[in-house]
Image (spheres, grey):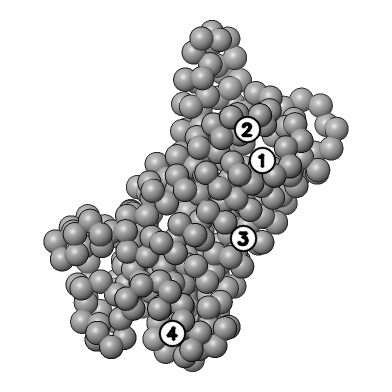
Amino acid sequence: MEASSGYKDYVAGLMAGVATVITGHPFDTVKVRLQKYNTEAGAVKYKNGLHCATRILQTEGVKGLYRGAASSFIGMAFESSLSFGIYSQTKRFLQGEIDGDKPQPHAIVPSAAFGGAIISFILCPSELVKCRMQVQGSDFMVPKSTRFSGPLECALKTVQEEGLTGMFRGGLATLLRESVGNAVFFSTYEYTRYFMHLQLKGASSESRQLIDVGVGIMSGGLGGIAFWSAVLPLDVAKTIIQTTPEKNHSRNPFSVLNLIYRRSGLRGCYTGLGPTLVRAFPANAAAIVAWELSAKLLGIRRDQ
C-alpha cells in the first residue's frame, strides 16, 4: 500500500507530463497529420508514418515535428499532475486497509477512469489548439489568412469565431478516450509491475535501483501500447472533429467513426496506428520512470 503523500502525488505527476511531451510530441505530430489528411476524401495522402515524418522534416525542419508543443506542455503538465494525483489518492481511498500489495481491480479501474474523466476537461481545449497548429504545416495549401502564428492566436480566434464552447469541440470523444484509456493503462501498468517485481524479488539490493527503472520502462511502455490500442478510433474521431473547418460538422464521435468506416474501413478508424504505437512505448515509459523517480525523491513510499 502507498503511504499518504498529499500534494506530492501531483508534483510527481507533473514531472511525468514533462517527460511525456519531450519524448513523444514528434510522434504525436505525425499521428495527427495522418489522422487529418489520410481520412478526408481527396486530401493529400501520406504513404505511412515514416513518409509523413520525412515530409515534415524536408519542408519544415525539426521545428515542424514540435509544432503545437507549447500548448501540449501546458496541457500535459496539468493533465499528468491531475491524472497521477487523482489516481493515486482515489486508489488509496478505495483500497482501504486491504493487506498485501497485489493489484486490486476494484480500486484501480474506477480510480483511473475517474481521473481520466476529470482531466478530459483540461485536455480538450489544449489538444484542440495543439491539433490545429499541427495540421497547418507548409506541406498543405492552407491559405495564410487562416493560419495561426502561435497557440495563443489559435485559441483567441477559436473563441472569437466559435465562442467559448468552440474550445471544447471534441469534448465527448476526449472524455471517452481518457476514461477508458486510463483504466486500461493503469491496469496494465499495475499488473505488469506487480508480476515483474514478483519474478525479481530475489535480486540483490545493489541492483534494486536499476531493476526499478527497468520495471518502470516495461510497465509504462506496455501500458501506453494497451491504452492506444484500446482507444485510437476515439482519438481519430477527436482529431477530425477538432480540426474540421465546418462549424456544423457532427461532434458525435460514433457518427464520425461510422463515416470513416464506410469510406476507409476498419483501417481508417486506426489511422496513425504506426506512429502512435512507436510513440506509446518510449513516451509512457519515460512518464512512469519520471513519476516513480520523482515519487521516491519526494518521499512517497510504494511497497513492491
In the picture, residue 51 is in which quadrant? bottom left
Horizontal side, residue 180 vs residue 263: left or right? right
Question: Residue at coordinates 25% horizontally, 59% vertically from top-left?
Answer: 63
Which residue position holds label 2? 298
Question: Mark 4 or mark 3, which has the lower sequence index?
Answer: 3
Number of the label disc, if any, that sits on residue 119 = 3
Question: Residue at coordinates 56% horizontally, 35% vertically from top-left?
Answer: 294
In three-dimensional space, the C-alpha distance between marks 2 and 1, rounded to whole angstroms, equals 7 Å
Dots 2, 1 in contact, CB < 8 A: yes
Question: Mark 2 or mark 4, which has the lower sequence index?
Answer: 4
Horizontal side, residue 39 vs residue 16: left or right? left
Dots 4, 3 in contact, CB < 8 A: no
Which residue position holds label 1? 8
In three-dimensional space, the C-alpha distance between marks 4 and 3, rounded to whole angstroms, equals 24 Å
In three-dimensional space, the C-alpha distance between marks 2 and 4, rounded to whole angstroms, equals 41 Å
Mark 4 or 3, closer to the camera:
4
Which residue is at the front of the view, 153 or 304?
A: 153
Which image quarter holds the N terminus? top right
Which residue position holds label 4? 157
Residue type, numbered disc 3? Ile
